Image (spheres, coloured by chain):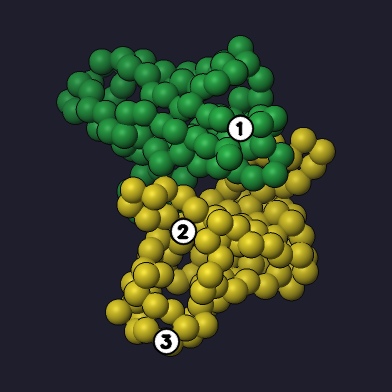
Chain colours: A yellow, B green
Amino acid sequence: EAQVTQNPRYLITVTGKKLTVTCSQNMNHEYMSWYRQDPGLGLRQIYYSMNVEVTDKGDVPEGYKVSRKEKRNFPLILESPSPNQTSLYFCASRPTGTSGAYEQYFGPGTRLTVT
Amino acid sequence: EDQVTQSPEALRLQEGESSSLNCSYTVSGLRGLFWYRQDPGKGPEFLFTLYSAGEEKEKERLKATLTKKESFLHITAPKPEDSATYLCAAYSGYALNFGKGTSLLVTP
């Protein structure tokens, strides 16, 4: 089954304790992205990657890191989480091509609480 | 600046009561307009892609249409299982801009 998987699905942590949220897709998509979703603010892009070893900032990259060493994986790293990073996080992937207008496939989400 | 605005923010319908959700966009060089459905606590699920003004797509009780300034998601004779948040997103060739969504509740 074609899918995007994220782990963990739920995480409660404390301020300053480094964490990683993993994301993996099995559709051989070049493009992968991370979003956060907050009430009243909608989906906001954190980072994206056009292909292996190519990453770029989205709209809200502060406090986050990413890496893309393999095509299928795109982990999100919070090196020193703070309470304002409490949110619902989504990983997404899509193919790339000449038009670029391809739908994104989203993972199930990771609900992060930082106390 | 590219913007996507959805209205209304919330909509409550009786089962069978048809209505439309609006997505207005200001995006230079629209390459694609996407509609997604999102259930609480879950990832958005792709519904439609529209590429050019005048295009329409249908899926069960849903029909999406596109003009040069806005897109509509028409819901015909909705059922309670259609309750969800509906998101639209506009792709300019550089970025995908999401609206904040319309939360739809369909009551029996």
Q: Residue furthest left?
A: B108
Spatial CA span between label 3 and label 2: 19 Å
Residue type at tag 1: Val
Residue tagged by mark 3? A16
Element on which disc 2 rests: strand
Q: Position of residue B68 (x, y in %)?
A: 59, 18
Residue tagged by mark 1? B27
Task: Pinpoint the chain carrying mark 2.
Answer: A
Give the mark, 3 or 2, whose residue is nearer the N terminus.
Answer: 3
Residue type at tag 3: Gly
Spatial CA span between label 1 and label 2: 22 Å
Residue tagged by mark 2? A36
Task: Pinpoint the chain carrying mark 1.
Answer: B
Please tell me how crowded label 2 is: few (under 14), some (14-19), or many (20+) other residues with Cα within 10 Å: many
Q: Position of residue B102 (x, y in %)?
A: 35, 34
Would residue B60 be visible to someone looking at this image?
no
